[in-house]
Image (cartoon, rainbow, N blue to C red):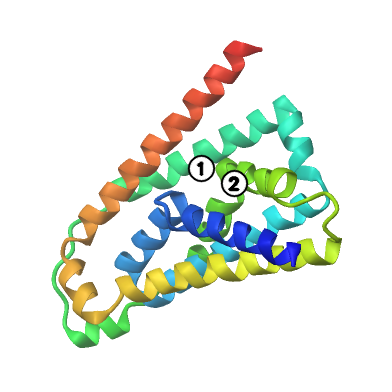
């Protein structure tokens, strides 16, 4: 019964974390509104695959090592910040788009491989996700919890994250929404790009403060 209580705590915390705006939300929104449903789905699957990385190193205790090794944590922080800044600058350059017919809506070809990779790297390099999983596996989940139960938690987190972003993509690409937003989607790109650049700057500032404290 105690494991069910532990699981419910994890599920609630994860729900708030995954639903809050962040890099994952930004890239899913951008690709869904710019390239269509299939591209958004691929980004969502890439994000879910990125969660596998966080679960894997948390299960073997690497998350704690990262947190307790300042130079390693700082390196990941900088790499993640620079990557977010890079995709932000790409998004902020988005060009205006014209309206489209139903046939054009159906014929949008997603950037399949790139979409998946963007989702995967965005989540994989998200230092905030590292801290989230560190918190889960060091404070919420008891050290006495069997590995098999922890593994089950990890599977749930991967599936729940993927399901949420697949649903978000589905919602954003409903024809009635997508066709109306399409001609203004370059502003969505620019807004998301600006948000990513600001987040990148925030992470770099946190890195600077960490350097100052050493």
Residue 88 is situated, as x and y percent measured from the top left of the image, at 38, 44
Mark 1 or 2, closer to the camera = 2
Q: Is residue 51 above or below residue 171?
A: above
Residue 14 left/right relative to 144: left
Which of 149/94 is in front? 149
Q: What element does badge 1 sit on?
A: helix
Which of 47/38 is in front? 47
Residue indicated by mark 2:
125
Asked whether residue 93 is in view, the answer is no
| Sequence-wise first label, 1 or 2 | 1
Q: At 16% across and 65% down in the image, what residue appears?
A: 183
Q: Is residue 152 above or below residue 85?
A: below
Which of 9/33 is in front? 9
Q: Quadrant of the C terminus?
A: top right
Asked whether residue 202 is in view, the answer is yes
Residue 118's tag is: none
Residue 51 left/right relative to 3: left
> CA–CA distance between discs 1 and 2?
8 Å
In which quarter of the view is residue 7 placed? bottom right
Decide: few, some or many residues near mark 1? Use Cα within 10 Å; few <14, some 14-19, many ≥20. Answer: some
User: Mark 1 touching mark 2, by CB under 8 A?
Assistant: yes
Residue 39 left/right relative to 70: left
Residue indicated by mark 1:
83
Which of 151/201 is in front? 151
Residue 4 is situated, as x and y percent measured from the top left of the image, at 69, 67
Q: At 85% across and 61% down in the image, what residue appears?
A: 147
In which quarter of the view is residue 110 placed? bottom left
Q: What element does badge 2 sit on?
A: loop
Residue 117 is situated, as x and y percent measured from the top left of the image, at 55, 61
In which quarter of the view is residue 173 placed? bottom left
Residue 142 is situated, as x and y percent measured from the top left of the image, at 78, 50
């Amino acid at each position: 019964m105690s494991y069910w209580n532990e699981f419910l705590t994890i599920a609630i915390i994860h729900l708030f974390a995954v639903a809050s705006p962040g890099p994952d939300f930004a890239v899913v929104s951008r690709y869904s509104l710019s390239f269509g449903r299939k591209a958004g789905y691929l980004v969502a699957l890439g994000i879910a695959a990125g969660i596998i990385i966080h679960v894997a190193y948390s299960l073997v205790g690497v998350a704690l090592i990262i947190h307790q090794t300042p130079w390693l944590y700082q390196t990941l922080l900088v790499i993640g910040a620079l990557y977010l800044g890079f995709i932000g600058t790409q998004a902020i350059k988005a060009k205006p788009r014209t309206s489209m017919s139903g046939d054009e809506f159906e014929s949008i070809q997603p950037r399949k491989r790139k979409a998946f990779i963007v989702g995967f790297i965005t989540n994989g390099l998200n230092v905030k996700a590292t801290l989230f999983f560190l918190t889960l596996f060091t404070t919420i989940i008891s050290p006495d919890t069997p590995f098999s139960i922890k593994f089950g938690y990890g599977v749930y987190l991967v599936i729940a994250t993927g399901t949420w972003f697949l649903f978000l993509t589905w919602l954003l690409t409903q024809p009635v929404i997508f066709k109306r937003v399409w001609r203004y989607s370059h502003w969505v790109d620019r807004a998301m790009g600006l948000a990513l650049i600001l987040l990148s700057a925030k992470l770099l500032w946190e890195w600077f403060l960490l350097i100052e404290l050493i």
